[in-house]
Image (cartoon, rainbow, N blue to C red):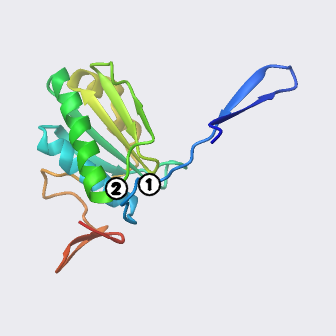
Amino acid sequence: MELHSTKRNKNSTKVVFLKAEVKPTSGAVDFEPIALAKLAADAASSKKGINTKVLDVSKLHGLVDFFVITSVGNSRQIRAIIDEIDEMIRIELGTKPLFLEGLGSNDWVLVDYAGVVIHIFSETARSFYDLERLWSDAKVVYEPDSETADDSLMEESDEGIVVGSAII
């Protein structure tokens, strides 16, 4: 499979276009992005993620439906949260991230699952970049440790919580 194509623009500058093809891993189930976002938020919270939130940016961003934002008290927690999110999503939804950025950083790691982007910050970096202010028009649709989040995208069933078409 070709991962990129190369072309030259009118100034003869070489331009590389990356091609991304999202393929679920074997055993993947059909799921809505909110199911993945909620699962990631719960996983982050279970590993002591601080002030974890899911923002609905679908009406504000052309490529992403949800941001999951969390922060950590120390750098070791970043890896623990990434590992927990990865494990939970692989087990429950059978998929893996498309992209991981900033793993060597102690400040901000970004994990891209196509329609859901997960941001894991140090507390200092979170207050500096302040994504919640930057995306203030986005609605907080889920907070794992809060009763005040808007759960209108989720409903209860006898089989579990239905999020879109997935049952968690």
Circle 2 is placed at which residue position? Answer: 94
Above or below, 138 relative to 3: below
- 23 sits left or right of 74 in the view: right
Instruction: Specify few, some or many for label 1: CA neighbours under 10 Å numbering under 14, 14-19, or 20 or more.
Output: some
Q: Residue at x 33, y 24 (%)?
A: 103
Location of the C terminus by quadrant is bottom left
Residue 141 shows in this picture? no
What amino acid type is highlighted by mark number 1? Pro
x, y percentage for residue 62?
Answer: 55, 49
Q: Amino acid at mark 2?
A: Gly
Task: Answer with mark 1 or mark 2, whichever residue precedes in sequence.
Answer: 1
Reply above or below: 37 against 136.
below
Q: Is residue 61 left or right of residue 157?
A: right
Q: Report the front residue among 33 and 154.
A: 33
Of residue 51 and residue 4, the one placed in the foreground of this image is 4
| Relative image position of residue 89 (x, y in whole percent) | 29, 51
Mark 2: few/some/many CA within 10 Å (<14, 14-19, 20+): some
Q: Which quarter of the picture shows residue 80?
A: top left
Do residues under tags 1 and 2 come within 8 Å of each other at their CB atoms? yes
Mark drawn on residue 133 = none
- Kindly identify the residue that appears in the image at 29 percent across and 21 percent down: 107
Q: Please tell me the numbered disc located at residue 24.
A: 1
